[in-house]
Amino acid sequence: MSKNKHIGEVILGLEGISLAFGGVRALQNVSFDVREHEIRAIIGPNGAGKSSMLNVINGVYHPQEGTVFFHGAKRHDVNTHEAAEQGIARTFQNIALFKGMSVLDNIMTGRNLRMKSGLLAQAFRLPSAEREELQHREAVEQIIDFLEIQAYRRTPVGRLPYGLQKRVDLARALAMEPKLLLLDEPMAGMNVEEKQDMCRFILDVNDEFGTTIVLIEHDMGVVMDISDRVVVLDYGRKIGDGTPDEVRGNQAVIDAYLGVSH
Amino acid sequence: MLYRENGQFKTSYRADQQMLPILQDRIFMVLLLLFFFAGGPFIFSDYLFLSIIIPFLILALAAIGLNLLVGYCGQISIGHAAFMSVGAYAAYNLALRLPQLNFLVVLVLAGFIAALVGMLFGIPSLRIRGLYLAVATLAAQFFMDWTFARVKWFTNYAPSGSVSTATIDIFGWSVDTPVRKYLFLLAVVTVFALVAKNLVRGHMGRAWMAMRDMDVAAEVIGIRPVYAKLTAFAVSSFYVGVAGALWGFVYLGSWEPLAFDINLSLNLLFMIIIGGMGSILGSFFGAFFMVALPIVLNHMPGWLGIEMSTAMVSNLESMIFGALIIFFLIVEPQGLARLWAIGKEKLRLWPFPH
Amino acid sequence: MKKNTNLIILSVGLLAGLIAPLASGAGDPGFYLEVLLGGLMSGVLYSLVALGFVLIFKASGVFNFAQGAMVLFAALSVARMAEKMPLWAAMLLAIAIMVVLAFVIERLVLRPLVNQDPVVLLMATLGVTYFLNGFGQAVWGSDIYEINLGIAKEPVMILQSVFQGGVLINKDDVAAAVAAALLVILLALFFQKTKTGRALRAVADDHLAAQSIGIPLNRIWVIVWSIAGVVALVAGVIWGAKLGVQFSVSQVALKALPVVILGGFTSIPGAIVGGLIIGVGEKMAEVFLAPVAVKAFDLAGGGIENWFAYVLALLFLLVLPEGLFGEKHIDRV
């Protein structure tokens, strides 16, 4: 892993985030930050609140307490498409692809934020609309090349094997040209080769585009390998925060994973 | 053998993105259009025009409209005939009170009015979905039924509640004979179908389909649900409003408020279920089926030499429709359009089995 | 909590609507009571049809748009068969027919569509409606038929001492209300006290869990649909006795939709309350509101009751999406 990359300032700050659903406390007073260009992993046992954390970052859930700072400014509660407009993209644990569309169309939807031609222009396929469509097609094709899914362009996503669907999910998020990319267990359910491919892609995205990445992952090998810093959650609380090595030696973290009762 | 894409390599994205990328499809479409525009007037009889082709064309337009909303954007509407009636009455009042307006302008304006009303009744879709939305759309249906029956201004204070329209005149070309009606409708429907195809190919169409497939994910990638849903309602109602105006002016000539009742709404829904939801071509298939079936059923006893009362025929019609809806929903939810696509796939491989 | 404030707003609105005609002195109290009672009676009928909806939806998650057609079919069967045999025999036979119908619908329509979107199921039951309409009329004919329940049709004057001129009510309406009440009590007992009833509630809660403890899903669904068929029969007979049996009865099915919106798709008390609210609301609107509107807007007659229920349901939906008694639906990402 390239240690020479330039990790920038803090672009995402979370302070005292608490989130509850009725009686269930998903997150309790969690604080950490994410620096530009880094790969930040969130790990922890099942039910620790990792997905909820991601959901807070991109506006799916609104925390009852705590503040989110984005690019230094305090961020009021946003909904998901506002978060998207701010440059936050994400993939889902359960691949939320659009099953009725092809791979190409799915990825093209990621460009929707940037496609501005009006209804009338599209209706009559005016030259301006055609040009915009082609321009964004180019951008999407680059991503398709990047993720090596050219052969599946026209396939309805529902027909693809799981590993490829996850790649399309990633492609769609990349199409948004995000500043911050949230990956929710991008390697879940993959075999060793698929995981290696996905690792390579994630590193390439971070390397070539400089995208800041926050990822949730269970495979410790992957996490230790590719992340710059790690946050550890357990029962909604933060129990570790630092570089992979620091976290690996943390007793609280070890206890959490071994299931020591507390 | 004939339907091969061999040698048709696309060297640009523009070529790849055409509406009909396969050469044979393009040739077929040109021939088809030639046949209908140039040949149709000579081949089809007046009876065929009046009883099948003209209603088919108008209903196909309405079906495309409903399909945009239900099939492409995934918002259910079981009261869509209400917007047809808005279009019809809007056109009637515009033609009546502003007689100097060209009918094409009247048609477009009527469409816009229908679009506005559609957007209004589409607002509930921002908060509710599925079955609940279906019931909300029924509110539109019954409220519009009532409005045009009771608010006398809309029917120009006609004592019977019925309205009748004068023959359409476009730049001196009178749309009076069946052939002229046919050509006029063919032109309108062709343009509208092309526009619909363009819309669903563009980013608006993709936004709609994203809302249909998984609205939560659509929002996450930045699609604004309000915009997507309301434009779907607006465009859909525009189409359906124009269809309503055409239905009243070109096909019916005169009508009472119940001409656009819940049965028409349900028929439109059936058209797109049988024809294929999420398919422009499917809308045509469904409309044709809906128009042709009663006629076939009416004549079949004669062909088979069996005696059957008209009541029995209409009962049979209901039964067959019902059975077909269920059949298509179970066996081929994507309707006749999918069967057509499968047929084309097989044709590509022919004469090889796979 | 937001739900509670919405509930309060709605209740206040409804109460205001209820009292307004009385307060404005649009008619004497006796007349008001008549309209109220009339509304309650038609509300009872709506509730019955809605009950069928709720039963099926609770147990199988299917919205049975064909409930109205089933009501019609049941009523038609009874009406026609009663021409050749005593009424009670006709009703028993009709119950048997409804059970067979339930079985057929479950096997041919429900089972193949078991994992689909609710809207797909809605459309499938629309198909069933069309089929039953055609089939019913093909088999039983399309004239208006009579069901004679042996109850006097003349209205009766009551409460003459309290209100001047008394209040007019129909004996068959009273019988209907009584029958409906009995049915609801029987159903409540069934669901709470019997083994099958408990199994039905388990299935309504969670199909998979119920299956995993050995409850035979398909059989349960047939039972549920049969019960719904019986409810449809009762509704159809009552309605048919009042109005005569013909095609328009299936429009009742549509009217029952607003009822389940108000009451919640999964609540039996909700179906009752919803039906009564709609019945009363409609009647009140038609009798008291319509004349005002006709004068104010120079309308060609009333007919508000044609859409009142739906618009009311729409307003409810915007304020209280899950209905008065329904369950809140949470979307899990």
Image: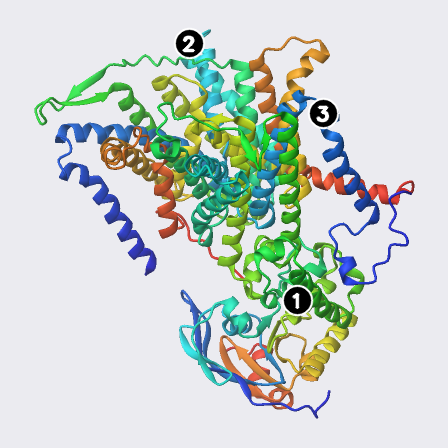
Which subunit holds the residue at mark 3? B
Q: Residue at x 21, y 44 (%)?
A: C16
Amino acid carrying label 3: it is Phe
Amino acid carrying label 1: it is Arg
Q: Residue at x 61, y 91 (%)?
A: A246
Describe the element under mark 2 as helix, strand or loop. Answer: loop
Please give the residue where the numbered disc 1 appears in the rendered image.
A172
Verify CB contact (< 8 Å) between mark 3 and mark 2: no
Amino acid carrying label 2: it is Pro
Determine whether C320 is above or below A180 in the image: above
Which subunit holds the residue at mark 2? C
Q: Can you give x and y, in whole percent of width and height, for residue B252 in the image?
A: 53, 26
State left or right for residue B178 relative to residue C200: right
* Badge 3: residue crowd in 10 Å (few <14, some 14–19, many ≥20): few
- Which of discs 3 and 1 lies nearer the camera? The answer is 3
Which subunit holds the residue at mark 1? A
Q: Label 2, label 1: how many angstroms apart (C-alpha)?
A: 69 Å
Q: Can you give x and y, in whole percent of width and height, for residue B254 in the image?
A: 48, 26
Identify the mark at residue C86; answer none if there is no mark: 2
Q: Can you give x and y, in whole percent of width and height, for residue C167 in the image?
A: 16, 24
Verify CB contact (< 8 Å) between mark 2 and mark 1: no
Q: Do marks 3 and 2 share a subunit?
A: no
State left or right for residue C302 relative to residue C206: left
The residue lying furthest to the bottom in this view is A4
Q: Label 3, label 1: how many angstroms apart (C-alpha)?
A: 50 Å
Please indicate, yes or no, whether residue C222 appears anywhere in the rendered image: no
Identify the mark at residue C170; answer none if there is no mark: none
Q: Can you give x and y, in whole percent of width and height, for residue A206 in the image?
A: 68, 81
The residue lying furthest to the front in this view is B172
Determine whether B83 is above or below A221 in the image: above
Please give the residue where the numbered disc 3 appears in the rendered image.
B44
Q: Do marks 3 and 1 share a subunit?
A: no
